Amino acid sequence: MMGRRTHHVRRLNSKRELSQQIVMLAELGDGSTPSVHFEGGAEERDKSALVSLLEQLTTSTALYPVFLDTSKLLVVVSIQRYLRGPGNEERSRSASSYLFDVTVTDGITHVKCHLAPALNSLVHWNCLRAGRGIHITRCSLVNDEKRLNRCFLQIEALELAAAQCDPSLSIPSLSIEPLRSLTTSQRGKDLLRTLQTETPLRVGRLHYLPLWNNNDPCGREWIGSKPPPFLNVPLEGFGLISLQDLSMTWRTNVGFPRLLVRIMHKSRLRYYGRPQTKVDFPYQAYFEVADQSGMMPLVLWNSLCPEWYQSLHVGTVLLLHRYSVKHSYQMRTWATPRDPQIKSLRTIEICLNPRDPRAEIQIVPHQQVKAEWRLPDIKYNFITRLELDQLSEGFTCDIIGLVTFVGRCQRIRREDSSEDFYLYRWVHAVDGSTEQPFVLELFATSQPETFQQIHPMTYLVCTQMRLVRELRPGGVITTVPYLTTSNESQISISGHHKGQPYTKDPKVQGFIRWVKGQHEKDVMKSSVIGGYYSFPPAPKLFQEYCKNLDAEALLTSTSQLKKEIESLHYKEHKRFILQGTIVAVQYVCHTEPAVRLGAVPIQEVDAFGASSSQPVRCLHSPEKDTRVIRQTEQLRVDPVRHHQRQSTPIFTRYWLRNRYPLRDLQKSYDSKCQAHKPLRKKLSNPPTGMPKQKRTVNRQMRALSSKRPAAAQDAEVAASTKGSSQAAEQPVPPNEDDYGRCDTGITTDGNSKYTWRSPTWSEIREHLSEHLHFGQLLPESIPRRFVYKHRDFLMQQHNLQATECSPATAVSNMELQSFASACCHGYYTVTMVGVNHQVAVDVVFLPVVMSHNSHRMLGLSMDVHDNTVASVMTSGYICDKQTADNDRPKQISSYPDQIIKTAADLDNTRVICILDVCHHGEGKSEVILHKMYRMTE
């Protein structure tokens, strides 16, 4: 494992050598002992690579970092995040407020290591993630000077290896027994003691945070011990006090009597930790509790949150003692009361503290709650979608619906922090009152088990939702209203409705009756998951878009765009506004795979019971070797070594090449074109007996079949029959030489089919300082038809990267491209040049075809236009030819070649473009044109 201390790290030169070192993890059987396998010889099985590394570090007297041989591959088991401790010396080396611990395995044992703060960006970009193979190239043994007998392993530099853990395999619970050999030295004993702890390696923190936000509970401590049993004894002997009496006497009392209350509202968790915070669990949870005399806020503080938050729900009855009372914090948000007969007592609040004194909390079981206690019932304000249109801005309501669309998880940065994010997703749900769905903006509500399991065909209940709508001058409503979560919102899905207080609501019962009359196939046709979705759509005029904002502050220069995109974190969404001119537009037809994953009828699900779903069956033979790990280009990550010589490490340059792939693939594309020229010449005289187009396709496929795998041949056949020569969702880049031609008409080149270029583009291109290529549509950007049978795989693809490896329910070689697209079969690549003609940027424009059934048409005007490039980019949709012919006698063509012909109208026209940018990890950034404005608009 160990190599000589040198500044040169050897790379693997052959696939055979790499495969001998890959860790093969076997699946866990029911009741069986986990096993680990190596593909190498007996030497690899006899000794752990991690043990060898730790033995050398613990026996060495030197404390400087050790350079390692990279032939041993490790797999990342988990990545854990926590807040930097107060006064941490790492602050001088990194501006990050958070640190990361990485657990790696060699197949025999596993070790938790601290990731050097200089490598944090690998996690921010989701390049270093659970299941990824790595090679540690430099590491050190760090002694914790603030603790006795404490040291840990720190990763100083690493390579992202050419291996990804197969998702069909699971990470077993590996034994730490091989590390017992470290106890021969004192440093080995200290290290072994550290490796066995479940707390963060760095001093100052006792718990981990969620990897992608701060609002969700994370870790075993949140499971907590079960609440102590409630003694079914008469409560009159406890000397209870009512909330109203408490509000009048709290200043004079020292020890308050017990309270018997019911939880009426529950908020999401609030994490208030900062690096200077010394509280072990800096959490706060806000509730509103009530008895027969009124309703009062209650706050759960600090370490009581991990112990009790998961056990306290709306409707739970509590017996409280040893609490404190103080003036309430009036700046917080408040839930909207449903029962006007309950008196509001919000001037003071009840505080449950972990000490001084420690609050006593008892949960009264539902079956032991007595009617003579006169505790108020939970009431709701459910509305139908038909009623929503008549409600005003800011109205608070509850809804129930059948989910038809679930967007991907995205993050937006908090205004007051550069490293904290809000997590959200868009959802559509119908309730049968109208064809229009509820449009829901769901932020994380501290219910990760529910938030991550939302999928089409499930029954969704959202409470305390706030209505958002935009009013134009004169009170005219111009956009579709949508609902967003409040701080007190709670979400429930199928399998979690049983026993909830809302199940007896009349409108909920009406929804159940409507659902029973629906056919699965009809609902499945409109079910969509993931892909690009931006709501609400921008208004028609740019002045309206910026009416409440400073337009000059919103505009981003093209030279600044690259830096802004590079600063994005994983799944972060951000909007930019650019001004310039459009110099090129091309249409790209992304083809569909030849074989689709068919839909199967969903299981019968009780409206408010658990579903009787069966395990997902594999589509492939179980004998297939699932241990083969995909190989990609290796990366060398050593920012410390290269920091003195250049501004960015080697990894960053590789990362930027992935972000701008068209330039790097140009030579490969040119060579392919040259290779196919003789073939095209040979096929110029096709044989007789069949149509010319079909004969050409057949001859091409037979000529290339010997060099292509079977899957590629199937994709090529599907592409050829649809008039395109590219593989599914992987457009071949256009030839740069074609851009240089002064051509005001349309051209065809390979799979891009139709292209328009400004006559000035050739001259502008020669003087560009940079050309940013984001014109390739990513598979993650395409909304997919939902297949209930493969719901686990689809949810996994559209949720965030998991913190740790776990048994996957999806087939290992299933790909997102295998699912049918829910949008049109093509997209446009738009080249825009800044006003100074210094920087050009290629972006994707993904219009929607006018249809009342499309989830992306909500909020759009549905006005018929002439299908020119300018009108399509302004409206966001393409008018259907048949619909347009019914509204006006003039023929309107929706064919791409006819639309591209009208792009010349944009020549030398100053425009303003609204761009939606989302970072998908590993150097993949999505830049999509949301709307275009002419300067005259």
Image (cartoon, grey):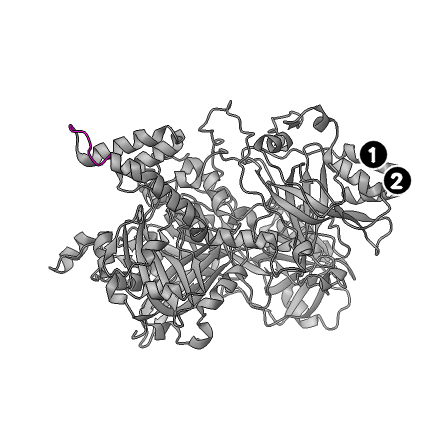
Residue under the point 47% across and 29% down: 618
Residue underneath mark 2 = 185
Location of the C terminus by quadrant is bottom left
Location of the N terminus by quadrant is top right
* Disc number placed over residue 236 in the picture, else none: none
The image shows residue 676 at horizontal and vertical percentages of: 32, 39
Q: Secondary structure at mark 1?
A: helix
Q: Is residue 64 above or below residue 294?
A: above
Asked whether residue 620 is in view, the answer is yes
Q: Is residue 782 above or below residue 324?
A: above
Residue 615 vs residue 879: left or right? right
The image shows residue 723 at horizontal and vertical percentages of: 26, 42
The image shows residue 322 at horizontal and vertical percentages of: 75, 59
Q: Secondary structure at mark 2?
A: loop
Q: Nearer the viewer, residue 757 or 453?
A: 757
* Local crowd size for mark 1, using a 10 Å CA cut-off: few (<14), some (14–19), many (≥20): some
The image shows residue 678 at horizontal and vertical percentages of: 30, 37
Residue under the point 58% across and 37% down: 165
| First to last magenta residue range | 683-689
Indicate the amino acid at tag 1.
Ser
Residue under the point 72% across and 73% down: 251
Q: Nearer the viewer, residue 344 or 704?
A: 704
**Which of the 4 quarters of the picture holds residue 929?**
bottom left
Quote the CA–CA distance across marks 2 and 1.
Answer: 9 Å
* Local crowd size for mark 2, using a 10 Å CA cut-off: few (<14), some (14–19), many (≥20): few
Residue underneath mark 1 = 181
Indicate the amino acid at tag 2.
Ser
Asked whether residue 920 is in view, the answer is no
